[in-house]
Image (cartoon, grey):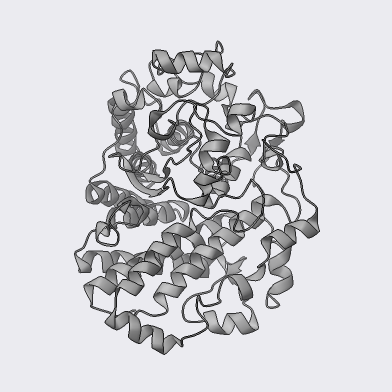
Amino acid sequence: MKNNIKYIVASAVMASMGLIGCNDLDTKLMSNHVTSDEKSDAISSKPDLASAGVVGISSTYNQYQAVYANHIDFGWPSVMMILDNIGPDMVSDDIGYNWFTSAGNYDLGNNNNYANNLAWYHAYKIIRSANDVLKNIDSETTDPDLQLYASQGYANRAFAYFNLAQLFQYTYKGHESLPCVPLITEENADAVAAEGCPRSTVQEVYDQVLSDLDTAIKFLTECGYGVDRIADSGAKRFISLGTAYGLRARVNLVMNNWQAAADDAAKAISTSGATPYSITEASQPNFSNSEDHNFMWAVYVQEVDRVVTSGIINWPSHMGSLNYGYASVGAWRYINKALYNSIPDTDCRKGWFLNEDAQSSNLSANQAAYVASNSIPAYTQVKFAPYQGVLGTSTNACDIPLMRVEEMYLIQAEATAMAGNAAGGKEIIENFVKTYRNPSYMCPATDAAGVQEEVWNQRRLELWGEGFCYLDLLRLNKGLDRRGGGFDPTWVYNIAAPLKPFLIPNGEMEANSAID
């Protein structure tokens, strides 16, 4: 099943990436045959051209081998898997079928590793696609169709820069003046292509992120449309008004704008209309269909997508236990044993993982038999259902969550407490867990710091496998402690905070002369 070697030499890496550097990859216009003015005129008369560009932004998240010509690259979900594998909560084995061993080994100490290249280039691909849409729409437009399309450019660009800022420099608070990443927008893209682009400060990047989200929210409010107007199917691949509020809640949380984060999370909940999985729904493998009522935003996957037709170069292949892929032939994804043991037996999320006897009360009889017949090991995740619930399927067309409404309750609880209302934050987290996950739950916190710590514990469970683990360590200034987690002995680290930022890739340093 895996015929190519586990690692490739640096020259092959550079050849497979092919398009290194923001002054090549991230700014070049999609067409060389029309001018920008001609494109603007065309979009004004035919808004469907902008609509196609917006669909193109969403497809960027699901690109097949866009950075590396090997089996680790299946779009933004590759970055999500890296961010979980380099943390303490996802355990895997050091075997040939595990493409994420460099992340599992926390091997990030050079400028040409998988983690920094995938995060950097996939983020800038999103930015380029967003800029291509925004370049041809007046930022003051009052046309509701164009407002809807522009909102997607602004919001997706904000998402990409927000992730870059978190990964390629220390967290916002206390580091506002440090150099961060190059800011490329529709305004300077042509100049950057010719001259390169220096790094902006952390403050400047976050200012751009908030400005983009503010504009996206303004346009989504004024246009009065739902995002289902953009395409006939897969509406949750687009950023709705509720999702835009959710993104701004994430940003304000990292910036320690506590009350703003709490307010935005509340608006995300009310505006989206999304509701958490019930205890019954969470007590079975799930989280694979963007049509579910708790999904706010997702990587929308179709059976014809290249990542799916590849068979094994996709997120379910590397993550899934109940379908066919890399995980099912030995690259299983386990929960940290100590974290698993901390989950109360009354919490339905304990069943998202096999116990020490390789069993879970969340599984049906058929699913349990499948686990037994395939000798799936203890502590393996069974949180994520296979496509259409078909056990052993090799059609890995599951949608992948980018934002669920449950996260908004967690943000609201933490931010409310940290804004000065510890009792209110405690009440929010307690009501959420008791209602949707564990009827016996009682929040042990007595002050704001305690609520923040308890919310982090809940995030480790609720958002396991969805790309948040390492980002939470960075924003909370926590170290990386894998002791007692069940890791390979050579992967057991106890690294003190602050954890180091990712390094800018060699290819970018070589191609972008404006970076010092």
Q: Which corner quadrant holds the C terminus?
A: bottom right
Q: Position of residue 333 (x, y in %)?
A: 58, 30
Asked whether, in this view, residue 212 is left or right of residue 47, the answer is: right
Residue 113, relative to residue 442: is it above or below? below
Q: Position of residue 329 (x, y in %)?
A: 63, 27
Asked whether, in this view, residue 398 is left or right of residue 50, the answer is: right
Q: Position of residue 266 (x, y in %)?
A: 27, 48
Q: Residue at x 49, y 63 (%)?
A: 126
Q: Which corner quadrant holds the N terminus?
A: top right
Asked which quadrant contains residue 241, the reply is: bottom left
Q: Residue at x 71, y 48 (%)?
A: 108
**144 or 410: which is nearer to us?**
144
Number of numbered discs visible in the structure rendering: 0
Q: Residue at x 63, y 84 (%)?
A: 194
Residue 447, relative to residue 269: is it above or below? above
Residue 50, relative to residue 241: is it above or below? below
Query: Can residue 355 be spotted in the picture?
Result: no
